Image (spheres, rainbow, N blue to C red):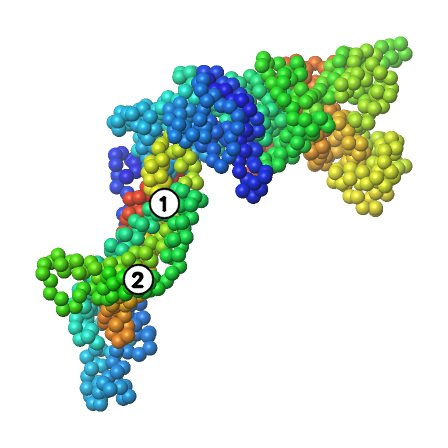
Amino acid sequence: MLEIVDLKVHYENPEAPERPIRALDGLSLDLEAGESLGIVGETGSGKTTLALTLMGLVRRAAIQGRIRFQGEPLPVADEARMQRVRWRRIALAFQSVGSAFDPVYTIGQQIQEPIRLHLGMGEAQARVRVAELLEQVGLDRACADRYPHQLSGGEKQRAMVAMALSCDPDLLILDEPTSGLDVLTRSALVEMLSRLRRERGLTMVVISHELADIAHLTDRTLVLYAGRVVELGSTPHLLEDPAHPYLWGLTNAYPLMTRAKDLWGIRGALPDPGDPPAGCRFHPRCTQAIPQCREEVPVLAPPNPRFRGAGRRVACHRGGVVTLLAVEEVCRTFRNGGQPIPAVRGACLTVREGEVVGLVGQTGSGKTTLARIIVGLERPDSGRIWFEDQELTAGGPEGWDRARQRMALVFQDPYEALSPRLTVLELVREPLDIRGLGTRSERDGRAQEALAAVNLPTGLDFLYRRPHELSGGQLQRIAIARALVTAPKLLIADEPVSMLDASEQAKVLRLLKHLQNERGMAMLLISHNLALVRKVCDRIAVMCAGEIVEEGPAHRLLESPGHPYTGSLVARSRHLFSAEHPNPPSSGSATPSTTRTKEGRA
Amino acid sequence: MVRRRSGPGWAFPARAPWAPRLALYLLTLWGMLTLNFLLPRAMPGDPLLALMDPESDAYLADPGIRERILQYYGLDRPLWEQYLVYLGRLARGELGWSIALNTSVAGLLAEHLPWTLLLMVPSILLATLISVWAGAHAGWRRDTRVDRALLVAFLLLDTVPIFLLGILLLMVFGVYLGRFPLSGGQTPFASYASPWAQLADILRHLALPMATLTLGLAGRNFLLARNSMVTVLGMEFMQVARGKGLPEPTLKYRHGLRNAVLPLVTRFAMQMGAALTGMILIETLFAYPGMGRLMFTAVAARDYPVLEGGFLVAGVAVLLANALADLSYAWLDPRTREAPCPT
């Protein structure tokens, strides 16, 4: 029904005519009749430009490329011919409905306009149709006689949809249909739209940055970044397991009711559309960019087979989000006088680029042993470990050595981990000294940067202190700085905050998450504290008696644990970390510790 | 448009919305009357100066007569007493007696006002039509050659002082081409063969002053009209209207101009004062027998009653124009008809 090939829309740039604003740069898509396509992307990624282009409403821009609609080219530049296409064949429910209605005419008059023009109805007939349309979108018929300023935002959104449906268009474009609406209005609107879609077999393009709306309203989704398509595929597959790092970041930043972790956006900002970066436009913000990404524009190609879904395409030189660390069936048994003590029994674990994975389990479940195996402090009895596509278990110690430059480990107890003989500066500089990286002054500089990054002073007075002069929080920060100084790809933190008081713990944890996000590192956070882990982790792996019994997205794992052990862990944590005292003070206390509803106590 | 309120059926608004507005107008009227009284008296000199000045030819040598005349006009009394007398007279509908011309002020106004209305009403209507149409067109064709040409022409009209424009028209059409009479409202001492001939004569006299005033006023409104149109055209709902596939004239007039006209209405009312000032200059220039000239001579003679009467008419005209704008605004813009939604 709709076929777009290599569409480019470059707006004139009044300040710099030689640098047009590249709103869309080579977009291609197909849409079958009856299908619903979602278009996702940040503000400024070119979504609305696409909608306006299809309506022929783009002004002061150069449009290139081929658009075919119902088998014939769409005359987007021909105002007179577009007039006959608009609303009758393609209708657009505009965004920002606050100002989308002419303030001096009633809603009914404005919906009537296209009906009378395109369908040739008389006034009386058109009035009847308006009333029907309003009822279809769940509005009172009386709304027809109201002026736009007398309607609420949600009512205007519905009226806009009614207006868009008024001439039975072949293609309906919804541009941010739910932006700025409250939850109840929004869910009612989404329900109404999916009902209308079912009833009328509408062909739709849904433009939204609201992933929830996309999930409910579309079959396929196209992800735009800075005017280019970065991923395309069936909506459930795309949202469940995003391949492109951009979509991965977007889904991770999306608030879910069940998501307990703090929200962190994708690092950096959308590029200047007048001067986009060369190569892949996402590379300055990507955690897995390689030199090729800076030079070559990636084409849409099937992603790594790990990502499921037919017809899936991703524009990434690395075939989607890369697995940084893979642990497969790793076993390690210690012996105590001939008595075998299995510490790790066939553990499997993956950590992807830029991801925070929590490894949770009770003391003695083998978490620390597994961490020591990953960094090469222990050799596994069997099993395989890959890091950055290198199988470490296959090669000799030099493989681990190289890998260790890209991994760093932060231990639980900074008092034990940091040598009391060294000064702060020496402690942080040591990883560089050992590898002999750079000159002495360069190393000092990098050490000071790392200290600054963990919010520690960098004055001489502080640099020459020794561990016994510092607090636990400061020492743990030094341990983190020491890990950061080599700019690792993977930070393995073994109970990094368990020795700290609640306030210091919160600060250090936020700092770790902040550094992880800014530097694009992946992090494996090992802890027995589920309440803590869920605040920062994207995924959680649960370890029990040397095995990983469950692994999954943090929100899902906490909401509906699959393994009984996880279930009991979650339940125990709930109980232990609930704010309620086992013996609450008698009612009438001054501090409201429980929620209240209007009818009475909850 | 009445809004349905909570409660059964259609209800009248709880409070008459025009009541506070009317009070405001009355207050303004009172302020204006007070100024009308004070301002002429604040000018140096007074209407009887010539009679009281021993240097003057018209000096009244008899102190008794001087006293009587002062008493007759009430000018010997303290200012606040004069003020009360003035308000009292107005309340009875009396406008007083001209000191300089020795006729009733009401008669003077009745004689001059029709001339002014004849000049002013068509000029303002014509100027509004021209400027709104041209402004809307220029805004619609923004940044094209038509827009630029209109912009230059109207800016020129706006910046040239109105009396200079009048002199220019007078020189070209009155003196060099000799097509139009130089001054007056009609040919003096003429006897007409028919009322039509008289009308033709009046219209010939009217042409130049009316052209001057029209052009002068049009220049002022053009920019606002254009700007207002450009603003409206940039609004989201214009894009929506275009997206609905509506034809150009519908977009331009039904949606564009219809909204662009709103600020112009306010401007129109506020301009009444300016139009009156322009009137005085133009009527003086063309020796037109309207209110402007009457006021001009009254100021020269410090003829307090005439000034009070003339200003009263002018002030009431401005107030009426504002009231008209207020009323038409409610009619033009549904958003001003009622308090905003309680949502």
> Local crowd at mark 1 within 10 Å, few (<14), some, or many (≥20)?
many
Amino acid type assigned to the residue bearing label 2 in the image: Val
Percent position of residue A505, x then y:
72, 33
Q: Please identify the residue farthest to the front as the structure is shown.
A: B177
The answer to whether B49 is drawn above or below residue A205 in the figure is: below
Residue at x 57%, y 37% (from the top left corner): A20
Residue at x 26%, y 72% (from the top left corner): B297
Question: Which residue does the numbered mark 1 point to in the structure image?
Answer: B136
Amino acid type assigned to the residue bearing label 1 in the image: Ala
Classify residue B159 by image quadrant.
bottom left
Percent position of residue A124, x then y:
25, 27
Quick one: quadrant of the N terminus of chain B?
Answer: top left
Q: Are marks 1 and 2 on the same chain?
A: yes
| Foreground label between 1 and 2 | 2
Residue at x 85%, y 23% (from the top left corner): A401
Res. A45 mark: none
